[in-house]
């Protein structure tokens, strides 16, 4: 494993972010981590059945990007979007209930782990078709550019996505029409079982984006202020009408592609690689940094952790005590405005 | 009321929708071309500007997805495909990201997009430039499908499609573009899900789709001179289907021909037959007759093309079949 694929631990340089924002970034990452690790346990206990693609290890990306977004900005995600949903401000209980397939879930038990929605905070859906939500994000950006509102769209996608043709169509269209959309590529170095170098001749995603006409940068996806700064610049550009950006965030998912296993020693990746990335934990390092500069004490961090655990436990209780959707409603929501199909 | 062509009716619907609703925009390949999608988008860029009438790169999937996203954001886009053949490239967007969306998110995000697929066939264009695959789309839950066969319906159905809160596939047929009839000058809707009895009759029901409505009317004229009274029904909307209208007609006539210019296997014609059989089995006097395309890709050469596309004589034969000794 070369140094470029696993760089040294993140070093934080902050400039004009006030304390409350720094705390929000840490808290959001902690919430995502707690949610994902709790979901992993519940999958092992077979209480959650829906296939869960866990975000553990990548928390800095969602948190840093969403911190730069307004509540009414749009967000689209993927099969691996629990973190995006939480960071954008989606309701935790509704997300957990969706994991359990309950009527109180954010998608009323029709979506599952891969299809989360929270229109009240700009999340119009996550798609489990690789690259599928890219053109849709370009479309919300097109709508807002026609209306001239300045609302921005953020679309998260994996490193496998530029292998799909529609990514290129979407990038070209966004650049051509100078649309207010930000492509956030979470390069976790794997696409299911395949490492990046087995799928591409060059490790050059950001350069490809640049050639399409997107403003393009690479950041350490385990460094939450760096992600935030890159996103803030991209959001400002988009809002002011300068067009789309691409942010490649280099990061790593700790668990396997889907489910709670770590998938080491299956011939895909090895323990050393995983250990090296666990050592780069975005939360541990950032918490340590905030303690070192005196914004938080160790006690504060522990207090935050307790608060987050409590919140997630509340969400689990809410989910398990919620009813399942009524089978009599099986064909509800096929069409809007249909006799029995509507709210 | 003025006499207008089908193409003019489609054009006028676009114009009036754009003028009356600022959420409406038009996007697709060729609005700025000199041919303007068979004149149906003529003058729109000049009047409404290229911000709302948008020509695009050759990215069927990307552009369809962009229209879908804009619809989710509350716009009322019309995204068109100058040929339905090329729309296959957008299939993932149409099914996975449009038709399924409202259901998959428990009714929280609807997609009021109109997808316009244009049938452009004839003149030896061959298999990849001739298709009219209605049934593939009718098959998909969450997608409405309309197929206007007259200038009046072409205008009114486009207006209704755009105003509907769901995704609607609007399929217009270039073979009909020169067809003329009286079309109101003001904006109006033809309601989705309502078929039309084009001609009343008592011996045979012919359910016809797209250009075969016109052919069925011609066949009915000829059959009338042989004292066979044909009722011609144009469903107009293939989904949701006005099945009661068809069933009530068959209850009266006891005989059914379905004339559908699409492939036969799992086609719209079989769908209509099955729906009718399951409701009227004991009153059918004869087995249902089908007039469809053959189960083969579209050929190029004129002689083969002529044999491939059904017309009034095929409908005539199908009806006569009932009365053969
Ligand atoms: C069109 C399509 N092809 C294949 C799949 C199966 N699939 C699901 S996730 C995935 C990997 C995506 O990798 P990447 O984009 O790097 O995202 P990550 O899982 O690493 O977050 C694949 C191939 C799919 N869901 N959709
Ligand atoms: Mg990946």
Image: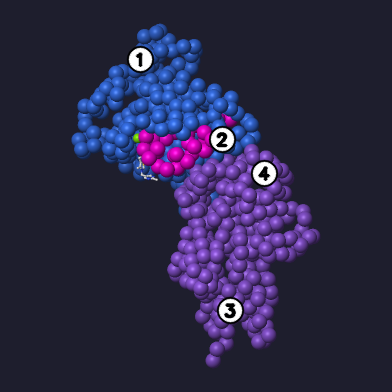
Chain colours: A blue, B purple
Residue B111 position, x and y percent, is: 57, 46
Say if B241 sits above or below A246 in the image: below
- Looking at the rendered structure, whether the residues under marks 4 and 1 are on a common chain is answered as no
Going from the N terminus, do you reach mark 3 or mark 4 first? 4
Say if A290 sits above or below B306 in the image: above
Instruction: Report the disc number at residue A11.
Output: 1
Q: Secondary structure at mark 3?
A: helix
The furthest residue to the bottom: B325
In the image, the segment drawn in magenta is: A151-176
> Looking at mark 3, is its residue's CB closer than 8 Å to ligand 1?
no
Mark 2 sits on what residue?
Answer: A177
Q: CA distance from mark 3 to mark 4?
A: 42 Å
Q: Secondary structure at mark 2?
A: loop
Instruction: Residue B246: name its quadrant.
Output: bottom right
Residue A214 position, x and y percent, is: 48, 30
Marked residue chain, label 4? B
Mark 4 sits on what residue?
Answer: B45
The residue sitting at 55% across, 89% down in the picture is B324
């Amino acid at each position: 494993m070369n140094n470029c694929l696993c760089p040294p631990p993140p070093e934080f340089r902050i400039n004009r972010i006030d304390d409350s924002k720094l705390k929000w970034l840490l808290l959001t990452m902690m919430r995502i981590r707690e949610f994902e690790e709790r979901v992993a346990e519940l999958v092992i206990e077979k209480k959650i059945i829906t296939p869960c693609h866990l975000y553990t290890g990548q928390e800095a990306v969602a948190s840093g990007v969403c911190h730069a977004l307004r509540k009414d900005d749009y967000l689209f995600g993927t099969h691996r979007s629990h973190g995006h949903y939480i960071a954008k401000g989606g309701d935790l209980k509704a997300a957990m209930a969706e994991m359990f397939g309950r009527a109180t879930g954010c998608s009323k038990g029709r979506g599952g782990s891969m299809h989360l929605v929270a229109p009240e905070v700009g999340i119009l859906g996550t798609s489990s078709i690789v690259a599928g939500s890219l053109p849709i994000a370009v479309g919300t950006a097109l709508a807002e550019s026609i209306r001239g509102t300045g609302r921005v769209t953020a679309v998260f996608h994996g490193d496998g996505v530029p292998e799909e043709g529609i990514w290129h169509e979407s990038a070209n269209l966004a650049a051509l029409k100078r649309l207010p959309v930000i492509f956030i590529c979470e390069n976790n170095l794997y696409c299911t079982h395949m490492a990046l170098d087995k799928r591409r001749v060059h490790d050059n995603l950001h350069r490809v984006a640049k050639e399409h006409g997107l403003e393009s940068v690479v950041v350490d996806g385990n460094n939450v202020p760096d992600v935030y700064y890159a996103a803030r610049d991209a959001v400002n550009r988009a809002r002011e009408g300068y067009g789309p950006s691409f942010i490649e965030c280099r990061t790593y998912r700790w668990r396997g592609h889907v489910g709670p296993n770590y998938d080491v020693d299956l011939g895909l990746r090895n323990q050393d690689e995983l250990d090296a990335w666990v050592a780069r934990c975005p939360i541990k390092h950032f918490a340590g940094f905030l303690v070192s500069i005196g914004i938080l004490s160790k006690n504060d961090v522990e207090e935050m952790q307790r608060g987050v655990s409590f919140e997630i436990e509340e969400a689990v209780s809410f989910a398990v005590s919620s009813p399942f959707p009524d089978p009599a409603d099986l064909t509800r929501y096929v069409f809007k405005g249909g006799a029995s199909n509507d709210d | 009321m003025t006499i207008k062509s089908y193409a003019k009716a489609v054009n006028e619907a676009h114009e009036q929708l754009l003028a009356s609703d600022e959420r409406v925009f038009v996007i697709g390949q060729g609005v700025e071309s000199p041919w303007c999608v068979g004149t149906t988008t003529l003058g729109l860029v000049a009047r409404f500007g290229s911000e709302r009438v948008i020509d695009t790169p050759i990215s069927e999937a990307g552009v369809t997805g962009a229209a879908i996203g804009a619809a989710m954001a509350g716009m009322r886009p019309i995204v068109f495909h100058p040929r339905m053949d090329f729309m296959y490239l957008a299939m993932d967007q149409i099914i996975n990201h449009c038709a399924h969306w409202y259901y998959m998110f428990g009714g929280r995000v609807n997609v009021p997009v109109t997808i316009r697929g244009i049938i452009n066939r004839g003149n030896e264009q061959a298999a990849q430039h001739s298709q009219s695959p209605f049934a593939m789309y009718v098959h998909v839950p969450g997608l409405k499908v309309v197929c206007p066969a007259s200038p009046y319906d072409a205008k009114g159905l486009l207006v209704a499609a755009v105003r509907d809160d769901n995704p609607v596939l609007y399929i217009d047929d270039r073979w009909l573009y020169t067809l003329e009839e009286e079309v109101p000058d003001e904006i109006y809707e033809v309601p989705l899900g309502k078929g039309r009895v084009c001609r009343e009759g008592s011996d045979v029901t012919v359910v016809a789709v797209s250009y075969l409505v016109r052919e069925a009317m011609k066949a009915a004229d000829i059959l009338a001179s042989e004292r066979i009274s044909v009722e011609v029904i144009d469903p107009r909307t293939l989904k949701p289907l006005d099945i009661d209208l068809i069933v009530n007609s068959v209850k009266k006539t006891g005989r059914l021909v379905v004339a559908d210019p699409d492939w036969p296997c799992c086609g719209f014609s079989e769908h209509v037959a099955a729906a009718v059989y399951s409701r009227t089995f004991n009153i059918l006097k004869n087995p249902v007759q089908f007039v469809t395309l053959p189960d083969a890709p579209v050929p190029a050469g004129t002689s083969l093309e002529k044999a491939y596309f059904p017309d009034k004589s095929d409908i005539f034969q199908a009806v006569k079949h009932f009365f053969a000794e």
